[in-house]
Image (cartoon, rainbow, N blue to C red):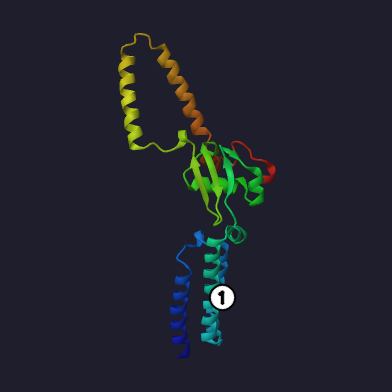
Amino acid sequence: MEWIWKAVVIVIAGTTLLRIAGRKSISQMTLPQTVLMIGIGSLLIQPLADKNIWMTIAVGAALVLTLVIIEFAQIKGNWLEKLLIGKSKVVIKDGVLQEKELKKVRMTVDQLETNLRQNNIARTKDVAWATLEPNGQIGYMLKPEAQPVTKKEFQAFASSIESSLARISAIPDTSELQKQLQELQTQLNEAKSGHLFIEVDRKSHINPPPEHLQ
């Protein structure tokens, strides 16, 4: 029955240690946190292999304490944070891929586009800034013209359309209107054919990236 109480102690001790270490998800962990979680996971199964359970818990506590000290040190010293965790890297600027930064972080264009699609971004040129964060996630800011419309903006647009329709109805010659409609249709067709989701369906890039980033 010894293994039963060992299992109970391992669960309680492991939960306590991980709670002290932090409550971030795997995708939000920094490099030191990831190393710690892997280490504790490997360490906690040692008592089930007839290792000393109290020594195991003590070593786990030492690991967590080390992580806590490192995290407090990062608050005091920016250089230590940069050394252990790293800094964000700009991978897109004004809709243009930053090839040097992509090479530094060893990220391909396909991997970057996958992250953009997961954030419902259809075109690279719509992105004002995109950064690769230390935890591996992509942060981004869309250009003003590509940002989602707010309710206030939509209401203002609807009012503008209504007043435009009123003016158009008073114009006998609609040739200029037809020209504007054709221009809008052309822009719409370009928007439909130029986004990253079409690339997945076609299994090829619309605008081929540099060979060294494919």
Q: Pointer 1: residues within 10 angstroms few (<14), some, or many (20+)?
A: few
x 51%, y 29%: residue: 190
Q: Could you say where residue 12 lies in the image, as x and y percent from the top left? A: 43, 79
Q: Nearer the viewer, residue 207 or 56?
A: 56
Left of 77 or right of it: where is 6?
Answer: left
The kind of residue tagged 1 is Ser
How many marks on residues? 1
Q: In which quarter of the image is residue 151?
A: top left
- Quadrant of the rendering where the C terminus is positioned: top right
Q: Can you see residue 201?
A: yes
**Is 161 placed above or below 139 here?**
above
Q: Quadrant of residue 81?
A: bottom right
Q: Could you say where residue 87 lies in the image, as x and y percent from the top left? A: 58, 53
Q: Mark 1 points at which residue?
A: 42
Residue that lies at the very extreme toward the top in this rendered image:
172
x 56%, y 37%: residue: 95
Q: Could you say where residue 21 lies in the image, as x and y percent from the top left? A: 48, 69
**Is 44 placed above or below 156 here?**
below
Left of 151 or right of it: where is 127?
Answer: right
Query: Under tag 1, what secondary structure?
Result: helix
x 54%, y 77%: residue: 62
